[in-house]
Image: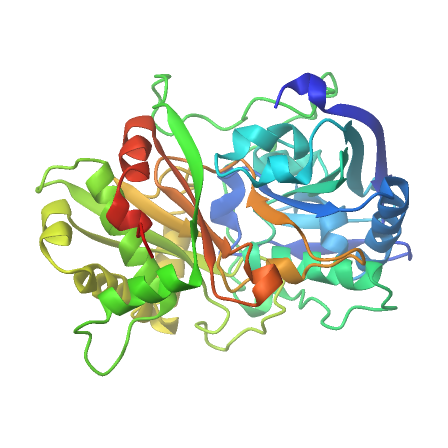
Amino acid sequence: MEKSKVKITNKTHIKPNKEIGRKECQLVTFDLPYLAFYYNQKLMFYKGSDFEGMVAKLKDGLGVVLVDFYQLAGKLGKDEEGVFRVEYDNEMKGVEVVEALAEEIGTEDLLVEEGTATFKDLIPYNGISNLEGAHRPLLGVQLTKLKDGIAIGCALNHAILDGSSTWHFMSSWAEICSGSDSISVPPFLERTNARNTRVKLDLTLPPDPHASSNGESKDPLPSSNGDAKPGPQLREKVFKFSESAIDKIKSRVNQSSGSKPFSTFQSLSAHIWRHVTIARDLKPEDYTVYTVFADCRKRVDPRMPESYFGNLIQAIFTVTGAGLLLANSPEFGAATIRKAIESHDAKAIEERNKEWESAPKIFQFKDAGVNCVAVGSSPRFKVYEVDFGWGKPEGVRSGGNNRFDGMVYLYQGEQKKKSGGRSIDVEITLENFAMERLEKDDEFLLVGV
């Protein structure tokens, strides 16, 4: 998609439509590691002909929903002791909303299976680090008029919320736009109930680059390896697994699993891990890491409500030799993943937090491990139920930020919006040569299923 196809026509800011006053909210141990990530990006696109009416409804609804989700209208700051926090007051600009035209592009064009380069210009804040939330809105929205509908591109500061909170906000915004006077599930904003340790980080908030007007900027963080070598050539692709394909994968993994069957997530994860390892052509003695960003709301003690607003995820790692993974049946990978996930209980979370707090390390988004497969998002998120009053989305995608070799995003499959089925869309980013091999792997694709 060439730049010339997307033309910015307007830029405004939306604030909560009620006076809230000064609010401050300390970021906690679950939030802080993501300061060095980039803004999370989501793109949803819908059919419709009344673009101006849609934009007006979205802006009005945003003003209402931000009363509850006011943190998204604030900015990053530090208190007098150097502890990071979200700050809000009525003088702040609020959420940035950009309007744009791309009338040569239709919703069908955005359903392509190739990756996010196709729609990079439909989502704001490409390559913007979360630290820049000190002078930039914590939520940026771009509303683009398409040939036959609207694209809603959102960039959300990952230091203040995870995937569960993102989709809680999106569904609440849609609820208001669909005619509700209030949202059915208000966000739980007391982060310190999950963790109340004050951690001071030696990170300097970047200055406000007023000279930059195009929304693009350099990452203010130093390189994690210190060497400015060009990275590998990466490519993204969406692989669509139908209900029957998912059932086939589960059946294969569960052939000899005993009394406790592997879940859809465990089965599909093992399938992806195994075939990405084959595609990478690793040596038997090479290590490969599987990483899942797991929701800890039900794992912490005391449990936190589903409506907890913030980051309440931790990366869970497991590692094995490539030869061992491939020499065994698919059950081996699934069992390895299940063991890592099940062992990450309240005690393990507490130990991880204490270890991190004693020697805080700010990770770069790509530090997920050697020969890694890292899974984010979840097919549990009801993304196709985000209806702003003009029907369900035609498609939902992640943007280009926070992608690296081996990053995987899982979403409900597009078919789900029509049939209520269990299909899953798998977004994968890999080095070029590995992606070419994966695309030709009939066993991975379950050709004929």
Quarter of the rendering occupied by the N terminus:
top right
The answer to whether residue 263 is above or below residue 142 is below
Please indicate, yes or no, whether residue 21 appears anywhere in the rendered image: no
Residue displayed at 65% across by 28% down: 121
| Left or right of residue 194: residue 360 | left
Q: Nearer the viewer, residue 341 or 328?
A: 328
Position in image of residue 354 (x %, y %)? 38, 60
Does residue 324 appear in the picture of this structure? yes
User: So how many labels did they put on this image?
Assistant: 0
Left or right: 346 as drawn, with respect to 28? left
At 11% from the left edge and 58% from the top edge, which residue is drawn?
A: 328
* Position of the C terminus by quadrant: bottom left
Most extreme residue toward the bottom, as rendered? 259
Hey, which quadrant is residue 384 in on the image?
bottom right
In the rendered structure, the answer to whether residue 181 lies left or right of residue 116 reads right
Vertical placement of residue 152 versus 292, above or below = above
Residue 103, by quadrant, is top right
